[in-house]
Image (spheres, rainbow, N blue to C red):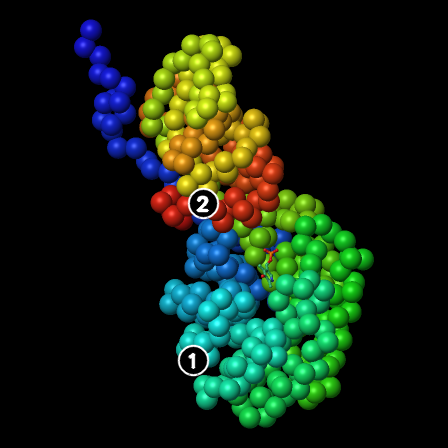
Amino acid sequence: MNRAPVTLQRRSGALRPPALQTLPVAVTGNVAKVRARTPSTIMAVVKADGYGHGAATVAKAAVAAGAGWLGTTSVAEASALRAAGLAVPILTWLHPSGIDAEAAAAARADVAVGSVDELGALLARTAPTVRVHLHVDTGMSRGGCPRGEWDELIGLAQRGQRARRVRVVGVMGHLALADRADPAANAPAVAGMREAQQAVRAAGLGSPLAHLAATSGALTDPATHFCMVRVGAGLVGIDPSGTVEMHGASRLTAPIVHTTAAPAGTPVGYAGTYVTERATHLSVLPVGYADGIPRELSPRAGVEIRGRRFPVAGRVSMDQIVIDTGAASFPAGTSATVFGPDGGATPTIGDWARWAGTIPHTIVTGIGSRVKRSTA
Ligand SMILES: *Cc1c(COP(=O)(O)O)cnc(C)c1O
């Protein structure tokens, strides 16, 4: 009787650590799906590190597939894309640390200005000429110049352009409705965009690029397309409108680090909220809520192991989850797929979103930094 304890057994070989793999070929396919629905220029929005998939990786795949622009929410993100070799026009908005005109010029990044104050601050500088997109509120009340101040914004832009401080190259709106196809609900925003476009033209600022739609509008409502559509979620396989099957662009895997046999009636995890109904096997995966596994999950939540779906047993811990594999006993080192585009027993990010009562965006952007990243 000289059997090694389980703990020694699991440490004897190197495991493949938890890994998030980005699939650029899926991004390519998703750009094609958008292209099939609009002739407008496609801006690939790669904020939040490309929705957790790696901004440069997603950007390169999208541009290679025909996206003509990139979108980010800070000049720093734009600079990183330039450093990664991306040469297409980049628009940044939001600007959490204010607009640094010098940095924007250095990154050859266009900036969206969403208020009279923001544009005023830009004009007060003696910086190089900045390419701006006038960001108008088209009904969302989340950023963008309120309708009552459009004239003031456009007047200021006119003076700024004469003084060569700015060049107005775009007019931007945003649709409040991102999660269902409803052209009637979009109509007021479309009318608002047209109005803003005309006011900019009337002010002698030419015919800047107008853009309003994000993924949902791009896939479902041609009236919202204008010159350009800004697609983020769609690139990584999320169709918020639920009308088009997109390609999932990432796969999260984790190794089993520990397997035990458990008799019927065994409580599992914190507070013993899950009790085994029969003799079974329990496998531990080294991913938890610190890695982005949602803590609040329906009992349906599960992972794929060797082509079969097995449920998550008990509470999600900070660093680990337990899987109930029933009669099957998998040795340490066996890879489990938490989510991926593979079909069959493999959950999708949409499945995880349903189990957690959220949207797939929060699943993909929430994967923690200690999960190793790679590209297929
Ligand atoms: C994030 C964002 C987008 C992209 O939206 P998706 O629904 O992810 O395609 C477009 N425009 C703006 C202003 C955004 O902030």
| Circle number at residue 102 | 1
Coordinates of residue 247 in the picture (x, y in percent): 56, 45
> What residue is drawn where x is 73% and y is 76%?
148
In-front residue for pair 102/254 = 102
Q: Amino acid at mark 1?
A: Glu
Q: Considering the numbered disc 1 on the image, is that residue within a helix, a strand or a loop?
A: helix
Residue 103 falls in image quadrant = bottom left
Q: Considering the numbered disc 2 on the image, is that residue within a helix, a strand or a loop?
A: loop
Coordinates of residue 239 in the picture (x, y in percent): 63, 49
Look at the picture and state if 312 lies above or below 51: above
Q: Is residue 360 left or right of residue 60?
A: right
Most extreme residue toward the top is: 1
Of pointers 2 and 1, the one earlier in the residue sequence: 1
Q: Amino acid at mark 2?
A: Ile
Measured in 3D between alpha carbons, the distance from the residue under mark 2 to the one under mark 1, in whole angstroms, is: 33 Å
Residue 263 falls in image quadrant = top left
For label 2, the crowd category at 10 Å Cα-Cα, with few meaning under 14, some 14 to 19 and many 20 or more, is many
Q: Would residue 94 be seen by someone viewing this image from the given angle?
A: yes
Look at the picture and state if 169 lies above or below 301: below
> What residue is drawn where x is 43% and y is 59%?
56
Q: Are marks 2 and 1 in contact (CB under 8 Å)?
A: no
Residue 140 falls in image quadrant = bottom right
For label 1, the crowd category at 10 Å Cα-Cα, with few meaning under 14, some 14 to 19 and many 20 or more, is some
Image quadrant of ligand 1 equals bottom right
**Residue pointed to by mark 2:** 367
Look at the picture and state if 137 lies above or below 356: below
In-front residue for pair 20/320 = 320
Most extreme residue toward the bottom is: 163
